């Protein structure tokens, strides 16, 4: 049987692409909730950069191979985390540590991916989709020309697409390589990100994916299906339909909802929970529901200003949604999607299944204080949050 030391020695080599420590065990608020490790070039030598997520901050530390192995060993089991997932060019690995300290180590070989390109520490921003390399769907969607040059008016869109793919890169260890994975994109619109997601997962990373884009605009759906056929993307489909009543699949691995307006986000999140999705990526938009409900005498001196009430309501809405997802067994983060200078609707809710559901203790009292009862709460707790604890 392979020991943890032997596993780490083999995984942390020149072909490692990504390693992720997750399954937080520490209750210390200053402890990292997740650590993402990747090889980088520093002063001409290869080392490993550990990016630790602490609250809304990401802290970076660099280690030699021996140091990163010691770091990972110390943080598994009795340390901060119960799980390590690694992705290599030819081999993926998983380490699970039970509460009693028992280690389960698994290794899975897969077809070789493109060679690992170790990036310099102080480098110019490197995008997942490279400028100068023509990508057919980006050409047809008007983001770049046939030589791969980004159109001046589309550079923000190009950066947004790559930022989205970075979020997906972080959750790759949560997606199975042993079977087809199903991804639903609610409110896909022109589908820049849907095409990018398929291209990245299928063409660049070699995952067996079935991606379904759903939108209410029939002309957009028709055009997207035409483009998918043109590129030979046989497992990328676009359908006309509503988020709230979609019943086309029984099981979904990842749910994506980008700028679904107001309650549409709640219906999408509830569907994701119903399907027991491993990953949820949501960029909410137009959080009107709480804005029409919120009332608190103590806050009235501030809430009387419309623009402040709108912004406070939007932030509280997404915070409540994140807490409700936590209560359903998800590790949830709220992250900046794109720079605030481009749009105020710039927060992304990223939730990864961890099976550690807990009752949101302070939420019922806060909801009562704000007179807030979101659609997502009603969908997940039809009898009300108070009834869950008999209060």
Image (tube, rainbow, N blue to C red):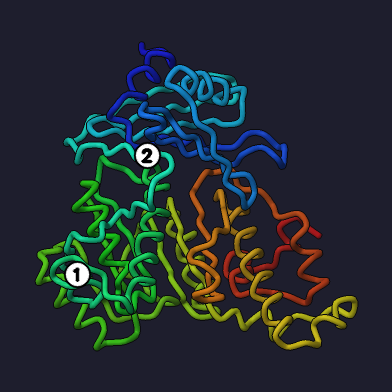
Name the one closer to the observer, 339 or 365.
339
- Report the residue at 40% width, 59% height from top: 163
Question: Label 2, on which residue?
Answer: 120
Q: Is residue 225 above or below residue 319?
A: below
Q: Quadrant of residue 191?
A: bottom left
- Which residue is at 37% across, 65% downward? 159
Indicate left or right for 178 with 19 as reference: left
Q: In percent of the image, x 79 and y 66: which residue is there? A: 366
Residue named by callout 1: 137
Determine crowd level at label 1: few under 14, some 14-19, many 20+ residues with C-alpha closer than 10 A. many
| Image quadrant in which you'd find residue 161 | bottom left
Q: How many marks?
A: 2
Q: Position of residue 136 (x, y in %)?
A: 15, 67
Q: Judge from the rendering whether residue 311 lies leftward or rightward of residue 297; answer left or right.
A: left
Rendered-image quadrant of the C terminus: bottom right
Which residue reaches farthest right?
Answer: 298
């Amino acid at each position: 049987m392979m020991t943890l030391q032997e596993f780490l020695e083999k995984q942390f080599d020149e072909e490692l692409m990504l390693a992720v420590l997750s399954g937080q065990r520490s209750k210390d608020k200053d402890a990292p909730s997740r650590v993402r490790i990747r090889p980088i070039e520093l002063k001409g030598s290869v080392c490993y950069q550990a990016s630790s997520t602490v609250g809304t901050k990401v802290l970076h530390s660099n280690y030699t191979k021996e140091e990163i192995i010691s770091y990972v060993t110390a943080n598994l089991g009795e340390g901060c985390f119960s799980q390590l997932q690694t992705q290599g060019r030819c081999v993926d690995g998983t380490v699970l540590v039970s509460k009693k300290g028992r280690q389960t180590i698994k290794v899975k070989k897969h077809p070789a991916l493109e060679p690992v390109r170790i990036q310099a520490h102080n480098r110019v921003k490197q995008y997942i989709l490279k400028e100068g390399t023509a990508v057919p769907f980006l050409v047809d969607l008007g983001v770049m020309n046939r030589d791969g040059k980004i159109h001046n008016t589309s550079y923000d869109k190009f950066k947004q697409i790559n930022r989205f793919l970075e979020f997906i890169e972080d959750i790759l260890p949560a997606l199975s390589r042993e079977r087809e994975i199903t991804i639903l994109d609610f409110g896909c619109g022109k589908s820049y990100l849907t095409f990018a997601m398929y291209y990245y997962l299928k063409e660049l990373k070699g995952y067996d994916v079935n991606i379904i884009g759903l939108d209410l605009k029939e002309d957009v759906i028709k055009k997207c299906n035409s483009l998918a056929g043109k590129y030979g993307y046989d497992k990328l489909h676009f359908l006309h339909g509503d988020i709230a009543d979609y019943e086309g699949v029984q099981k979904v691995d990842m749910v994506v909802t980008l700028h679904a307006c107001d309650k549409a986000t709640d219906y999408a999140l509830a569907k994701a929970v119903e399907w027991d999705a491993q990953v949820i990526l949501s960029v909410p938009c137009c959080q009107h529901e709480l804005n029409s409900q919120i009332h608190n005498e103590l806050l009235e001196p501030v809430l009387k200003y419309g623009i402040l009430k709108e912004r406070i309501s939007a932030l509280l809405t997404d915070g409540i949604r994140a807490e409700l997802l936590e209560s359903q067994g998800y590790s949830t983060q709220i992250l900046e999607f794109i720079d605030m200078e481009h749009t105020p609707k710039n927060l992304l809710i990223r939730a990864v299944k961890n099976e550690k559901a807990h009752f949101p203790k302070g939420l019922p009292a806060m909801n009562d204080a704000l007179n807030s009862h979101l659609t997502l709460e009603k969908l997940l707790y039809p009898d009300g949050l108070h009834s869950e604890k008999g209060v």
